Every structure is written in structure tokens, then in C-alpha cells.
């Protein structure tokens, strides 16, 4: 609802500009009028993990920019997108302005390459996103491709705040969030106490039915992704990492691997919240997007070391910093290579109207209603 409300406001102030062209002698007596018009039909492709709001983040800016949009929802979570399309249609939007098309990748590829599509907005995996950009040719493309977000806990941080925020950042939605807090870098003076408390809090998270208000962690999307996470953990353990809570004895494909320290066996698509120490470059749980309930903790000696550890990733979507030092905040803001640095909150912080997107392998362009609208629009200049 908030996403559509913001879009409704933003469509009242589509960008426009009057430009004096007589700054140079060639422009004497001339003035320019710059307006933005719809770039044409858009194609939105959305993932499974937020099957309603991430659809809204494609559709609402397109409607506000007067661009018809075809939305391909995730094949495993299409129903909320179809219900949203019914609601939007009932509101009186012209027929064809918002279409939802559950389809195979082959059909989606045909749409990506079709001449009638002018703009493509994709949220999903880096491998698929960058390949899509190659296929798109001359079309405008926006890619939101996830990451392996890091949080820095500085020596002056409020530990209680950092623990509470980063517990949510690490395990909400079972870690199936592109800005999931995957790496936590803690100043060495705080690290022992932080690690113990964070692990204890992770063990205590109530697991169960996601429709139960008391539940704080539940199942992952499917068995395939569970096995991938367990395999990555097994590889990390083999290379010297240690799981202090959660799925510590992952092995093979992880189908029957018990979790240690919790007494919980991995059942079906449930993986217990897993806190890992000793992880580093070369391990998938550190380098890649785990998209599961796994968090790696590591100490650091000084803030520049922490910044280097954040930046060694090929991703750069969002990062978090817990500190009350203005100089440390500004220093990190200038040097950390991400689309957004979140201060004293989790890496998962997002509101619907903020510019949202990343650098490096995390994507191309920005979402957030006003900023997404610019990608659905083309400038047109009148000179007279």
C-alpha cells in the first residue's frame, strides 16, 4: 500500500525543466523545455522472497510513469501477483496497463528480446541478471541482484542495539533477503562478548509456523536451496570454519545432517539459525550470497581493516555500521563500496521511497519509487 501511495504522489511531479540556452552565443534567443515521457512497454521480473511488495516496486513506478508493464512473477510464488493485478484492474486502470504473466524462462527470454519491450526491470540472481542484460540489446535495463551484506560493529557501538538489529538482519525470512546480514565484523575489544551473546540469541529464536506470531524463523523456500546451503557449510567446515550454533555437521548434500548445539535436526526445508566463525575469502559462505540462515562473525583490529573486509566482496548492495562517531561514519561512507550505508540499524533496512540498488555485481540502476520511475521515462526537449 505504501509503495502505491508514494507512486501516486510522485506521478504529480514528473520531472520537467526550463533551460535557458543563451549561455552561449549559439543559443542566443533560445529556450529549452525538457519533459519526460513514457519510454514504452516495460517488462518486470520479480523473485519469490517478497512476492507482493517487489511486484509493487515494478508495477507502481511504471503506472506512475504511464508505462504499460508486463510482470513475470516467480514461478514458485505467482499467486499474490495475480491477486494484485485483479485489485489494480478493479481500480479502473486502463486495460493492458498492468499485466501479470506467469511463464517459463523460455517465454521470458522471448519477451526480453522482443522489439516491443523498451524497459526491463529484473530482481534476482547475478548469473541470470547479467545474462539478461546481454540479451536485452538496446533496451533500458535495471538490475537488482543481491549481495552478501556486511555489518561493522565499531568499538564505540551500543552492543545491545547492534545485537538486536543484527539478529533480525541475519535471520529474518530465514536469511532469504538480498540485504541479509551475512557478514558481521566486530571490533576485537567487543568480539568475545558479542559472539557469545549473538550465538545464544540465535539458538533461542523460536522456530515454527510462519503464521504463528511467536515464530521468528521458519523454513526455506525449497529442498534444493536447503541442500545448497548445507553443502556450502560443509565446504567451509572442511576448510577450517566452525559453526558455533546451527547446522555444524553439514555433509554431502546435507539431506540428513544434524545440527549441533541446538539439538535440532535439519527437517525438510528447515535449517536452524547458523552462526559461523573462522570463515574468510575463498569460502562460499563468505564470498557468495548464501540466501539462507547463515551469519559469519569475524573480529577486526581497526576501522580500515574492517572497510577492506567489506570491500573485498564482489557485491556492493548495502552495508551497516554501528557507531556514534561522526568521523568514523563519514570515513566509512566515503570508502565502503555499496549503494547504501545504514547507520545503527541492520543491513536489511529499507523503506519504499529510498533509492535502492547496488554497485559491482549487486546490480545496475536504482529502485525506490521516484528513482525507478526515471528508468521508465525518456527525456524529450523542445527548443524555441
Image (tube, grey):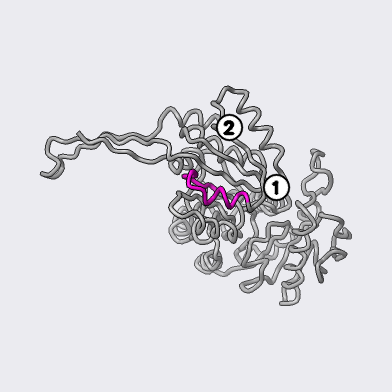
Residue 321 visible, this orientation? no
Tell me, yes or no, whether the two marked residues, 1 and 2, touch with CB atoms within 8 Å.
no
Q: How many marks?
A: 2
3D distance between C-alphas at marks 1 and 2: 25 Å
Relative depth, front residue between 329 and 26:
26
Task: Characterize the local packing of mark 1: few (<14), some (14-19) or many (20 or more) Cα atoms within 10 angstroms.
Answer: some
Residue 111 shown in magenta: yes
Residue drawn 82% across the image and 54% down it: 270
Would you name the residue on which mark 2 appears? 2
What residue do we see at 51% from left, 56% from top? Answer: 133
Q: Is residue 326 visible?
A: yes
Mark 2 lies on a secondary structure that is helix
First-in-chain label (1 vs 2):
2
* Label 1 sits on residue: 75
Q: Which one is nearer the viewer's eye here, 267 or 311?
A: 267
Q: In the depicted view, which residue is nearer to us: 181 or 128?
A: 128
Q: Which residues are magenta?
A: 107-121
Q: Of circles 1 and 2, which is in front?
A: 1
Label at residue 142 = none
Answer above or below: position of 267 versus 90: below
Name the spot of residue 248 as percent of width and height, x first: 80, 67
Residue 15, image x, y percentages: 37, 35
Give yes or no for residue 234 being in the magenta stretch.
no
Amino acid at each position: 500500500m505504501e509503495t502505491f501511495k508514494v507512486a501516486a504522489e510522485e506521478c504529480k511531479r514528473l520531472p520537467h525543466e526550463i533551460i535557458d540556452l543563451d549561455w552561449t552565443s549559439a543559443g542566443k534567443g533560445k529556450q529549452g523545455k525538457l519533459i519526460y515521457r513514457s519510454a514504452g512497454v516495460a517488462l518486470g521480473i520479480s523473485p519469490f522472497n517478497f512476492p507482493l511488495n517487489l511486484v509493487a516496486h515494478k508495477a507502481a513506478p511504471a503506472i506512475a510513469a504511464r508505462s504499460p508493464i508486463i510482470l513475470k512473477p516467480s514461478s514458485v510464488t505467482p499467486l499474490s501477483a495475480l491477486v494484485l493485478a485483479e485489485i489494480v484492474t478493479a481500480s479502473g486502470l486502463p486495460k493492458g496497463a498492468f499485466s501479470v504473466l506467469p511463464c517459463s524462462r523460455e517465454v521470458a527470454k522471448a519477451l526480453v528480446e522482443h522489439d516491443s519491450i523498451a524497459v526491463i526491470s529484473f530482481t534476482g540472481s547475478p548469473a541470470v541478471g547479467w545474462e539478461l542484460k546481454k540479451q536485452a540489446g538496446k533496451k533500458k535495463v535495471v538490475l537488482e541482484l543481491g549481495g552478501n551484506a556486511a555489518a561493522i560493529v565499531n568499538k564505540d557501538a551500543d552492543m545491545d542495539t547492534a545485537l538486536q538489529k543484527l539478529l533480525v538482519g541475519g535471520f529474518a525470512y530465514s536469511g532469504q533477503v538480498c540485504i541479509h546480514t551475512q557478514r558481521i565484523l566486530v571490533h576485537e575489544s567487543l568480539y568475545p562478548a558479542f559472539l557469545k551473546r549473538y550465538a545464544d540469541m540465535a539458538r533461542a529464536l523460536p522456530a515454527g509456523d510462519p503464521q504463528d506470531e511467536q515464530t521468528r524463523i521458519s523454513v526455506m523456500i525449497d529442498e534444493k536451496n536447503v541442500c545448497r546451503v548445507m553443502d556450502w557449510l560443509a565446504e567451509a567446515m572442511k576448510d577450517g570454519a566452525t559453526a558455533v550454533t546451527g547446522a555444524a555437521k553439514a555433509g554431502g548434500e546435507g539431506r540428513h545432517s544434524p545440527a549441533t548445539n541446538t539439538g535440532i535436526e535439519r527437517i525438510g526445508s528447515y535449517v536452524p539459525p547458523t552462526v559461523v566463525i573462522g570463515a574468510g575469502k575463498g569460502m562460499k559462505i563468505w564470498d557468495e550470497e548464501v540466501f539462507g540462515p547463515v551469519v559469519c562473525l569475524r573480529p577486526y583490529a581497526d576501522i580500515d581493516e574492517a572497510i577492506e573486509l567489506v570491500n573485498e566482496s564482489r557485491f556492493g548492495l548495502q552495508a551497516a555500521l554501528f557507531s556514534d562517531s561522526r568521523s568514523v561514519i563519514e570515513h566509512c561512507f566515503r570508502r565502503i563500496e555499496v549503494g547504501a550505508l545504514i547507520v545503527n540499524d541492520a543491513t536489511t533496512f529499507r523503506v519504499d521511497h529510498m533509492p535502492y540498488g547496488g554497485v559491482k555485481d549487486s546490480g545496475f540502476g536504482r529502485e525506490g519509487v521516484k528513482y525507478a520511475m526515471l528508468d521508465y521515462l525518456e527525456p524529450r526537449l523542445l527548443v524555441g
